[in-house]
Image (cartoon, rainbow, N blue to C red):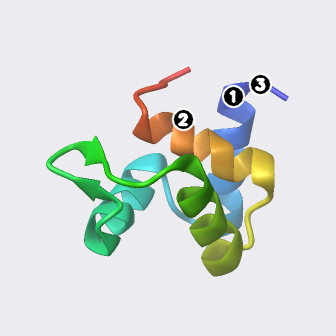
Amino acid sequence: MSFQAYIDNIKVKTGKSPADFKILAEKKGFIQKGELKVKAGAIVDWLKNDFALGHGHAMAIYATFKGKKQ
């Protein structure tokens, strides 16, 4: 599955874009002043627990937090 397919599937499943998840991560304190303050595992656990995303989909969102666009 391509990176974009992961992002598209996440949008369908949750109704949220990577930008929406970034805003939520900022509210949780995971991202402060544009910088990640936690490791990937914390982000993945949050996305799995709160949004029922699988590991690969959660890692795709994490990758967008790190700057990946495609």
Task: In the displayed orientation, state which residue is furthest to the right.
Answer: 1
Q: Residue at x 78, y 53 (%)?
A: 55
- Locate residue 53, reporting x and y percent: 73, 63
- The quarter of the displayed image where residue 48 is located: bottom right
Q: What label does residue 2 carry, if any?
A: 3
Q: What label does residue 19 carry, if any?
A: none
Horizontal side, residue 28 vs residue 1: left or right: left
Say if mark 1 contacts mark 2, CB within 8 Å: yes
Q: Residue at x 54, y 35 (%)?
A: 63
CA gap between label 1 and label 3 equals: 4 Å
Q: Nearer the viewer, mark 1 or mark 2?
A: 2
Horizontal side, residue 35 vs residue 39: left or right: left
Q: Residue at x 48, y 24 (%)?
A: 69
CA gap between label 2 and label 3 equals: 13 Å
Q: Residue at x 48, y 25 (%)?
A: 68
Local crowd at mark 3 within 10 Å, few (<14), some, or many (≥20)?
Answer: few
Q: Which residue is mark 1?
A: 3
- The quarter of the displayed image where residue 70 is located: top right
Task: In the displayed orientation, state which residue is furthest to the top.
Answer: 70
Residue 21 to residue 63: above or below: below
Mark 1 or mark 2, earlier in chain: 1
- Locate residue 12, reporting x and y percent: 68, 58
Residue 18 to residue 3: above or below: below
Mark 2 or mark 3, earlier in chain: 3
The kind of residue tagged 1 is Phe
SS category of the residue bearing label 1 = helix
Say if mark 1 contacts mark 3, CB within 8 Å: yes
CA gap between label 1 and label 2 equals: 10 Å
Q: What label does residue 63 carry, if any?
A: 2
SS category of the residue bearing label 2 = helix
The kind of residue tagged 2 is Ala
